[in-house]
Structures are given as C-alpha cells and as structure tokens.
Image (spheres, helix red, strand yellow):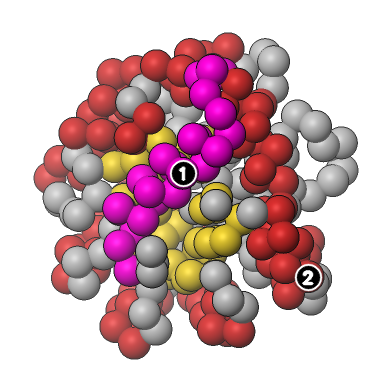
C-alpha cells in the first residue's frame, strides 16, 4: 500500500477527471494521496476534492512561487482553513531561489508567517526548497515546528542530515528515476530508509518512463517505487510499507 505525499490533484492539467485519477491510483495500490494547495485561490478546490474523494487529504499553504501575488489578508484566510478544514499539514510552503527575479524578502515573510501558523495549530509542514535548502534550514532552526516533509529533496548529504535532525522526512519521486540522476541515486541509496517518503508531485516531476508532454499521475507511483526500490536492492513491497509508515508517522492526522 503506497502513500503519495505530494499530488496537485486540482491542477488544470487534470480537468474534471480527479475521480477517475484517484480510482486508477487506488487500483494500482496507492491508497492515500496528500493534496497541497498553492494559494488562497485554490484552498476551496483542494478542500472540496478531499471531502469528495476517499483517501485524499488536504494541506493548505501559500507556495513561494505565488507569494508575489499574495496579500497579508491571505494569511487570515489560511488560518481559517487550518482551523476549520481538518488539514494534515501546512503546505506547500517554503522558498524558491531558482525562479527569475524572485523577491526573497517577500518569500521569507510568508514562509515565516506560515511557520508561525504551523506552530499555532501543531501541524507539520510540506516544504518547497528549490535552491534554498540552507536558508530554509536557518528559519526552521529559529522557528521550530513539529517536522514535516522536504518535498522533492535534492540537496547534499549534510543538508539531508540537518532536515532529519529537525524531524523531517525527505520526499523522492520521478526525478530519481532518470539514469543521469546519479547524485539523487546516491542519496536515495544511503539515507536512512526511515527518513524517506514517496511522492509524484503530479502533474509535475514526470518520471523517466513518460514522454515529455505527458502529465504525471498518482497511478504511476508504483512504477516509480519499483525503480527506486531497485536502487536500494529491496523489494517494492518493502519500500511501499516503509515509506507509508514514515508518511503516517509525520502526517499523523491521516488515519492508519
């Protein structure tokens, strides 16, 4: 039984086919899907989908790539959703220093304010950390939360160890299925299995077995898991069980 810890089920690429997507994923062995939001405009869509579709669990947050359009009152809206809509995490939040002309000050403001909300509601966080691992770690040391998941982890061994010390699991998915991803392969082989969770980031982060124009889907997680299990020379069943247990240990509002 697999757990997809990061799937943007409400994305436009999926149209109105979410029920079919979830049923296909469940038939393939993906029984739990965490659906993060990216800003207040899709809080309602994420909430509705997760209330209608069995096995789907919401997270609410303001993504760093959407902070340019964010307003301080969005944090009030977020607080209401965290209080009333039974989320499993605050997310997707964090920092992104890869995009062009990013506003670091504004990204950090919303990140810090959302860490405060995570502490207030005792929730884990789903972190976006692209090209920003050390700065994210700096804020996590100052504003300790109950842990969470470092989504799409691709940092160094030292950075991985620092996230683990702070109570975080590390998310791996389609990016590690490419033969050229040798650094990710090394990380995945050598990090403690107890610190790893699986994700699709669907419709993004497509695995190597998809064509470029094909959207990623949660039903592909078993095939991703099979490839990643081979990197550690363990069975896909062992990887599925361990990573699902890891996900449930950090996202403890998801029923076992």
Residue 45, image quadrant: bottom right
Circle 2/circle 1 CB separation < 8 Å:
no
Q: Residue at x 48, y 13 (%)?
A: 186
Q: Residues within 10 Å of mark 1 (few under 14, many from 20)?
A: some
The dot on residue 79 is none
Residue 167, image quadrant: top left
Q: Magenta span has 180?
A: no
Q: Residue at x 46, y 18 (%)?
A: 189
The dot on residue 20 is 2
Judge by depth and name the residue closer to the eye, 76 or 236: 236
Q: Which residue is mark 1?
A: 241
Above or below, 212 against 231 in this view is: below
Q: Residue at x 80, y 32 (%)?
A: 209
Q: Is residue 132 shown left or right of residue 11?
A: left
- Distance, label 2 to label 1, CA atoms, is 25 Å
> What secondary structure predominates along the stretch shown in magenta?
helix
N-terminal label among 2 and 1: 2
Residues drawn in magenta = 231-253
- Counting from the top left corner in percent of width and height, residue 195 is at 34, 35
Check the picture and name the quadrant holding the C terminus: bottom left
Q: How many marks?
A: 2
Q: Is residue 128 shown left or right of residue 89?
A: right
- Counting from the top left corner in percent of width and height, residue 201 is at 60, 49
Q: Residues within 10 Å of mark 2 (few under 14, many from 20)?
A: few
- Counting from the top left corner in percent of width and height, residue 139 is at 21, 44
Q: Is residue 114 visible?
A: no
Q: Is residue 188 shown left or right of residue 235?
A: left
Above or below, 8 against 135 in this view is: below
Judge by depth and name the residue closer to the eye, 107 or 86: 86
Q: Is residue 3 visible?
A: yes
Q: Secondary structure at mark 2?
A: helix
């Amino acid at each position: 039984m697999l757990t997809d810890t990061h799937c943007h089920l409400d994305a436009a690429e999926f149209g109105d086919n979410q029920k079919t997507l979830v049923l296909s994923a469940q038939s393939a062995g993906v029984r739990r899907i965490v659906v993060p939001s990216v800003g207040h405009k899709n809080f309602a869509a994420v909430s509705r989908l997760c209330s209608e579709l069995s096995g789907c669990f919401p997270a609410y947050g303001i993504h760093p790539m959407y902070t340019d359009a964010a307003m301080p009152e969005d944090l009030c809206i977020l607080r209401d959703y965290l209080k009333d809509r039974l989320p499993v995490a605050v997310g997707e939040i964090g920092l992104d220093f890869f995009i062009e002309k990013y506003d670091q000050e504004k990204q950090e403001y919303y990140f810090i304010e959302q860490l405060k909300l995570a502490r207030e509601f005792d929730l884990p966080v789903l972190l976006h950390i692209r090209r920003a691992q050390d700065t994210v770690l700096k804020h996590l040391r100052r504003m300790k939360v109950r842990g969470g998941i470092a989504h799409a982890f691709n940092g160094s061994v030292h950075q991985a160890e620092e996230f683990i010390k702070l109570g975080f699991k590390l998310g791996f998915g389609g990016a590690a299925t490419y033969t050229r991803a040798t650094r990710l392969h090394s990380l995945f082989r050598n990090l403690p299995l107890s610190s790893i969770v699986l994700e699709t980031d669907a419709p993004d982060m497509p695995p190597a077995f998809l064509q470029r124009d094909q959207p990623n889907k949660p039903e592909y997680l078993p095939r991703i898991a099979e490839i990643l299990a081979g990197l550690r020379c363990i069975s896909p069943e062992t990887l599925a069980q361990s990573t699902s247990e890891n996900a449930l240990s950090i996202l403890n509002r998801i029923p076992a």
